Amino acid sequence: MSFGRLVNRVWRENILFSILIELTYRCNLDCFFCYNDLNLQGRPLDEQQYFDLLDELAQLQVLNLTLSGGEPLAHPSFFRIGARARELGFLVRVKSNGHALGERLAARLQREVDPFVIDISLHGARAQTHDRQTRVSGSFDRLMRNLERMTERGMRLKLNAILTAWNEVEMEEMYTLADALNIPLSMDPTVTPRDDGDATPVHIRPSAEAVKRLFDIRARRAPERFRPAFASRENAPLPSAGTDTCDGADGASAEKHCGAGSSALAIDPVGNVYPCVQWRRQLGNLHRQSITELWCSAGALTPVRELGPRIKHMVEGLGEAARHAAFCPGLAELESGSPLQLYPAAQEKLDIVGKLLKQAR
Amino acid sequence: MAAFGQDFLTDTDLFPARISGEPWGEMSLILNVAGDRYLVTGLSRTQASVIRQRFVDVVFDQHKDPKKNIVPIRIFRANSNDFRDDPPRGEPRTLETLPQSELVQVAGYHFMALLHGFPTPATGMWTCETAGLAFRLAFENMFRLMVAYRLLMRGALLLHAAAVVSGAQAEIFVGRSGYGKSTVSRLSRDAGCTVLSDDMVALCMDNGELRALPLPFTGELDPATGMADCYPVRALLWLNKGNHHELSALSRAAALSALIVCAPYVNNDPNRCEQLMQNADRLAGGAPAYTLTFARNGGFRELLNQRLAAPWTA
Amino acid sequence: MDRLSRLLHLRDDVRHRRVEDEGVLVLQNEAEVMVLNDLAYRIIELAVEQRTVASIIAALEEEYDVARDVLTGDVMAYIDELTNIGVARLTDATSEENGA
């Protein structure tokens, strides 16, 4: 019984398995490309509502719980929510910028929440590049100190980086840095507009050449078993790791492109519910209905689920290269108004992988 | 060296770096102060009520000239655990600032604030207080600082000064705490003058004329009601307590220096030093400046009326 | 103390969830995932309730139409597997009550 097969089942049978909660949009950094809608209106969920939500999610068989933000540790109830999640047996992932995870908070996080992994954002291999993104001077140096200490404590860490025009020249250096820290690094070439549609971050999208270099690096670094058969040893992009939302492991056997809305949901600080963190099509609000009601009613989820096979067929129709283009219906809808429309970044990846395929033959 | 804010905050590493978070409510107000409209949003009903009560003379619920000089202040939630209950060392300090080129971080009793986006900064304030005196003090501490910066960026200054209106003109009594601002205010009021404030006033140049703008910030005396938006200034008076009355001319440099010394908040900001000097210099040249030595018997009013009656040119 | 009287205690870093008629066990420290069949996961669920091995077997006897000796054999074999790979351990009921 493989986990991949289980994930396929979860997708196929619409079993809610993963939840991402944006606890707060408060943040102790000010990243230029942050996608949060900082003008979000609404009443924040209170602590009891979060506890009730967690109880329901456990009843609904959700395993994966990601606490995100903003900076989730800035939420006043972060530790109580995290501890409760741990009590209820969730596999807790914390997405943090690491800026506040010095000795005291890191110890507390380990002691009270014991997350499965802490995803930490890295924006460059050098202070100048990283701080340029965070817009907080000294943030890189502090992060390096915090990462060393957390590693010494035996905390499970993962570095997440977005490839941008600002850091693309030091891409290789970032991998070297991660290796030296003994922390895995996942790099994504997709810079997205903000959730309110503001396209300002898109101005720092990486060059096509840099995206190709990233694919090369990922292929070189991928364990043999993850390299697609079509690609040469140098040119296979690694599937995204760690979640079931975007990557269903054996996704080919599920009649859906991804788990958004069929095995996963995202929730923002004021209780709006979305198919996933990137797909900001509002499905409901937890002030008006419970997560169970929302998940079990035909309502807003049906159109999203019905799109799943259509998106899959659309992507398959684009050819073999499309399997590695990481098409995101949420991003498509944000950039073009339709979850079925190919958007510029996806087209670019398609072109790059297409060329790699040709070269491999 | 102590980390910024550690007298007030339990975790300085979580200080917000951007104006974002979860609001306390959906209420909003406009505070019309010294020619600017401060749009305060994210308030709960009780918070809005506290501000309305405190700033009754300058608060509006709806925009007037909505496009004119709107300065945004957003109020966000924080938790009581974010803050220390009592500032250490027993000091009644109200706040601490960490000014940088693009922003100013502020930590105070049960609140944090960020002024961001110079030269026209917006403000975010995170507080755990929602009602009563506690919220009022937190908001007012932040608001005074915000007004000081806003005036600075407009070419004006917020001053620790008493402002008294005599015959439709303002006299500005400049001095730090304990120099006698409240005393001269009280004595002037007893002599029939109108006290704009015994603690804070705004000064600006308007069409070449130095003007005093009333502010809703006072010390020991209640502000007068029904004041005009501004008053031409007939003198800048540096206070000196003594046992006699004397008015001696103050050089422009000394007047400039006096204004800088009495410009709270912004005179601690090395990033705004040049702007402060420029403003103070321009304002110091807008009216005659004197050192006023005064005794507590109020007789200095006669001296002022005699000496300041003569026309003055810069 | 014989094994039937002992508590089956999961390791602190283990996370688990039922998915319909299967179960997922995640060993956080090793970042490993195990997918369990219904019976195996039911044992996990009962262990989380702080039951002795005997109590687990008794509960399963009511839920599964299997002879007691067969059920006992299967349960003990599975518990052996869990303890051998370090996912769980058998503890004295008394030591657990005293928070040991």
Image (cartoon, helix red, strand yellow):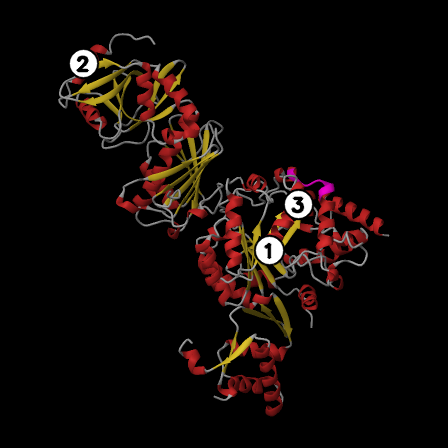
Residue indicated by mark 3? A171
**Magenta residue span:** A204-210
Check the image and name the residue furthest to the right: A361
The answer to whether residue B214 shows anywhere in this view is no
Measure the alpha-carbon separation of dots 3 and 1.
Answer: 15 Å
Label 3 residue SS: helix
In percent of the image, x 82 and y 51: which residue is there? A357
Q: Position of residue A173 (x, y in %)?
A: 64, 46
Q: Position of residue B160 (x, y in %)?
A: 30, 28
Q: Amino acid at mark 1?
A: Ile
Please state which amino acid type lies under the numbered disc 3: Met
- Left or right: A101 as drawn, with respect to A301: left
Residue at 19% in and 19% down: B293
Q: Of the numbered discs in the image, which one, if any, rests on residue A183?
A: 1
Labels 1 and 2 share a subunit = no
Classify mark 2: helix, strand or loop.
helix
Report the disc number at residue A160: none
Dot 3 or dot 1, earlier in sequence: 3
> Looking at the figure, which quarter contains the C terminus of chain B?
top left
Q: Which mark is residue B303?
A: 2
Circle 3 packing at 10 Å, graded few (<14), some (14-19), many (20+), is many
Q: Specify whether residue A207 is painted magenta.
A: yes
Q: Mark 1, mark 2: which one is toward the viewer?
A: 1
**x and y percent of residue A233 in the render?**
78, 55
Q: Is residue B271 found left or right of C43 in the rendered image? A: left
Rendering quarter of residue B52: top left
The N terminus of chain B, quarter of image: top left
Please report, as a chain letter, where disc 2 is located: B
Name the front one of labels 2 and 3.
3
Q: What chain is tagged by disc 1?
A: A
* Residue at 48% from the left image edge and 54% from the top image edge: A45
